[in-house]
Amino acid sequence: MKKVRRNWIKPWLTRRADLGVCQTLLKELSNEDSDSFRNFLRVSPQQFAYLLDMVKDSITKCSTNMRTCITAEERLSLTLRYLATGESYRSLSYSFRIAPSTVCSIIPEVCDALYQALKDTYMKVPSTPEEWEEIATDFYEKWNYPKLFGGYRWETCCRPSTI
């Protein structure tokens, strides 16, 4: 006898469009309390819109006859919440009404999209010994570790002959 599948998705998860964090709390905070929005995602509503605009095309999925897709806005807010708090995937799953296995795939995908969109502007790799020396000096001034940056000593990894 063939086993009958009961549900494709748990019923409470299907109410994401009406009761999920993006449709309730984030909309409310964005409209009424931008400081709390910033505290929740660690970006302002304007910064969120900017980031969403940059990654929307690469993180948008299509809805099917079986399911409605998780929107780009939901994907980005889920990822930013995770990055802001380190909250567990399971906990995020409950608040965002997204299955834990889906949360596990969304976060790395969105992080990669953010990296690809922002790397050339915000993550330029130094190309000269002087630029490396400046980073080491800044690291010293901030953290009081001489000739150290990113866990490496200047003398051991970034001498001009190795660049």
Image (spheres, rainbow, N blue to C red):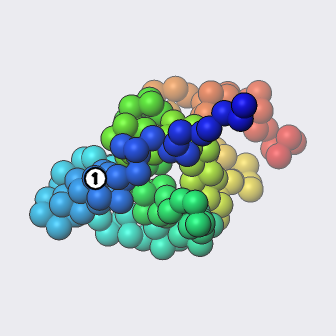
Q: How many marks are shown on the rendered structure?
A: 1
Q: Secondary structure at mark 1?
A: helix
Q: Using the image as rendered, state which of residue 58 and residue 126 is in the foreground.
A: 58
Looking at the image, which is closer to me, 136 or 94? 94
Q: Is residue 82 left or right of residue 60?
A: left
**Res 106 seen here:** yes
User: Image point 82% across, 46% down: which residue?
Assistant: 163
Q: Position of residue 95 (x, y in %)?
A: 33, 41
Question: What is the x, y in percent for residue 68?
Answer: 50, 62
The residue to which callout 1 is attached is 19
Quadrant location of residue 4? top right
Q: Residue furthest front?
A: 1
Circle 1: residue type: Leu
Viewer-nearest residue: 79 or 156:
79
Q: In the image, what residue occupies the spot 24% across and 63% down?
A: 27
Circle 1 packing at 10 Å, graded few (<14), some (14-19), many (20+), is some
Q: Residue at x 12, y 63 (%)?
A: 32
The spot of residue 80 in percent (x, y) is 43, 49
Left or right of 49 in this view: 25? left
Q: Is residue 60 visible?
A: no
Residue 2 screen position, x and y as percent: 71, 35
Give the residue at the far left of this rendering: 32
Which residue lies at the image location 72% right of the left edge and 31% below the top edge?
A: 1
